[in-house]
Amino acid sequence: MAVFFSNPKARRESASRWPDRAGDDRIGTLLDYELRARALRCHMFDPDVINDSSWLLAQDLFAAHLRRQKMRTKELCDTSGLPQTTVIRYLDHLQRLDLVRREGDPDDSRATLVSMTEWGAYWMREYYSQVIVAERRAAITGRGLFALAAETEALEP
């Protein structure tokens, strides 16, 4: 949902449109998490092979895999925000790497179902396991998302 930057020439307001806002310390914690996760992703997956666009597709397909579902190509376009030609190009790429598979939809001959292979799911599990381990390590020092969650839980009655 590109609310803020959908019209860059619109008059900028200093007040947020959203009633709840996080402080810079919490934003910094989330940003640090995302940067650590991205660095880990670049370490585990060749960035020339898995880039930001193909990563969006891999995440969507892994989430569907965990729910034991397959996705239509159109759904991948909708969830990723990528055009159909880009999605198809990256699916070709991910299929060559044996991370995803495509098959015809038995209910609709015009549609293609896409799913993550067991090999692709293995690597996604490895990645997310390592992200969790890294966040646990960061939480020990009072940083990271787990530390932030513990702080938030302590504030709740």
Image (cartoon, rainbow, N blue to C red):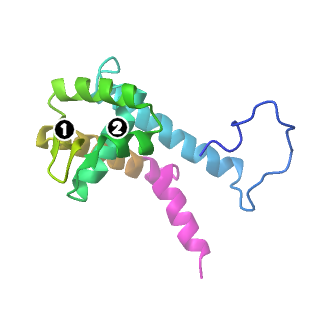
Instruction: Sort mark 1 into few (<14), some (14-19) or many (20+) by Cα contacts within 10 Å.
Output: many
Amino acid identity at mark 1: Gly
Q: Quadrant of residue 38?
A: top left
Q: From the image, state whether disc 1 or disc 2 is nearer to you.
A: 2
Q: How far from the left and from the top, in percent, is residue 44?
A: 28, 29
Pick the front one: 84 or 5: 84
Q: Tell which residue pokes out farthest to the front in this image.
A: 109
The structure residue drawn at horizontal position 23% and vertical position 46%, both measured from the top left corner, is 125
The structure residue drawn at horizontal position 81% and vertical position 30%, both measured from the top left corner, is 9
Q: How far from the left and from the top, in percent, is residue 48?
A: 33, 17
Q: Tell which residue pokes out farthest to the bottom in this image.
A: 157
* Whether residue 152 is situated above or below residue 80 in the rendered picture: below
Q: Does the magenta stretch include residue 97?
A: no
Q: Mark 1 or mark 2: which comes first in sequence? A: 2
The structure residue drawn at horizontal position 84% and vertical position 50%, both measured from the top left corner, is 15
Pick the front one: 79 or 30: 79
Amino acid identity at mark 2: Leu
Position of the C terminus by quadrant: bottom right
* Whether residue 128 is situated above or below residue 147 in the rendered picture: above
Element carrying mark 2: helix
Look at the image and give the residue range highlighted in magenta. 138-157
Residue 120 numbered tag: 1
Q: How far from the left and from the top, in percent, is residue 101?
A: 16, 37
Residue carrying label 2:
57
In the rendered structure, the answer to whether residue 134 lies left or right of residue 157 reads: left
**Dominant secondary structure of the residues highlighted in magenta in the image:** helix
Q: Quadrant of residue 8?
A: top right
